[in-house]
Amino acid sequence: MNTLFPRFNPWPVSIISFFVVALIGCGTFIGFCSRHPADLVSADYYEQEVRYQRQINRIQRASQLGSVTYDAAQKRIIIALPRNQSQTVVTGTIQLYRPSAINLDRQIELEPNRDGVQTLDASALLPGLWKVRVSWTFEHQEYFLEQKLTLGGKSS
C-alpha cells in the first residue's frame, strides 16, 4: 500500500452535499410560498355564510318531508312530497345532475299529482351515478332535497 496518497473518503462530501441540497430546497419552497398568498377568507364571507345557512335551513325543512327513490324494475325516478303540500300550489324544479358529464344534466319543472308524487322516466338516462336535486317553495318556505341514485342498480 502506498501511504503517500490517502484514499478518498466520500462520506464528508456526501453529508455536506445533502445539507446544501436540503437548504436550497427549503429556500426555494419558502420563496414559492411567499409569492402565493393563502387567503382563506373571501371578501364577501358574511354574505356567503348567510347563503350557506339559508341552504342548510332549506335542507333541514325538507329532510323529514320528501323522498326520492329509484324503481329499477320500471326504470323511473319517484319524487314524493308531503301530501298536505300537494293540495295547494307548489312551485319548484327537479335537477338531474350527472357528476361525470355536465352535458347530460337536465332540469324539469316540479309538478306533483294530488298525492304529492311525481314520476320521471329514467329509461333514457345513462346508467351510473346521478344526483337528483329537488327544490320547491310552499307557503313562502323554501325546501331542498338531494338524493344520490345509481341508475341501473340500487339507490344509495
Image (cartoon, rainbow, N blue to C red):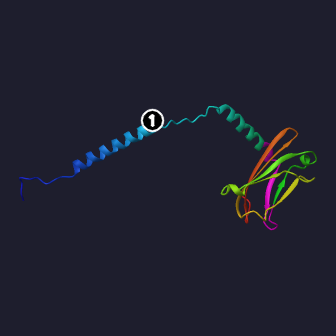
**Amino acid type indicated by mark 1:** Ser
In the picture, measured across the screen, residue 5 lies left or right of residue 85, that is left
What percent of the width, then of the height, locates residue 34? 45, 35
36, 149: nearer the viewer: 36
- Residue at image position (23%, 48%) is 13
What residue occupies the far bottom of the structure in this picture?
73
Q: Please tell me whether residue 136 belongs to the stretch shown in magenta.
A: no
- Residue at image position (32%, 45%) is 21
Q: Residue 150 is drawn in which quadrant?
A: bottom right
Question: Which residues are drawn in magenta?
Answer: 60-76
Q: Please tell me whether residue 65 belongs to the stretch shown in magenta.
A: yes
What percent of the width, then of the height, locates residue 96? 75, 55
Q: Secondary structure at mark 1?
A: helix
In the picture, measured across the screen, residue 10 lies left or right of residue 143, that is left
State whether residue 37 is above or below residue 3.
above
State whether residue 70 is above or below residue 13.
below
The answer to whether any part of residue 98 appears in the image is no
State whether residue 3 is above or below residue 46.
below
What percent of the width, then of the height, locates residue 38? 52, 36
Q: To which residue does mark 1 refer?
A: 34
Give the quarter of the figure containing the C terminus: bottom right
Give the quarter of the figure containing the N terminus: bottom left
- Residue at image position (26%, 47%) is 15
- Residue at image position (50%, 35%) is 37
The answer to whether any part of residue 103 appears in the image is yes
How packed mark 1 is, by other alpha carbons closer than 10 Å (few <14, some 14-19, many 20 or more), is few
State whether residue 36 is above or below residue 73.
above
What percent of the width, then of the height, locates residue 27? 37, 39
What residue occupies the far front of the structure in this picture?
103
- How many callouts does the rendering have? 1
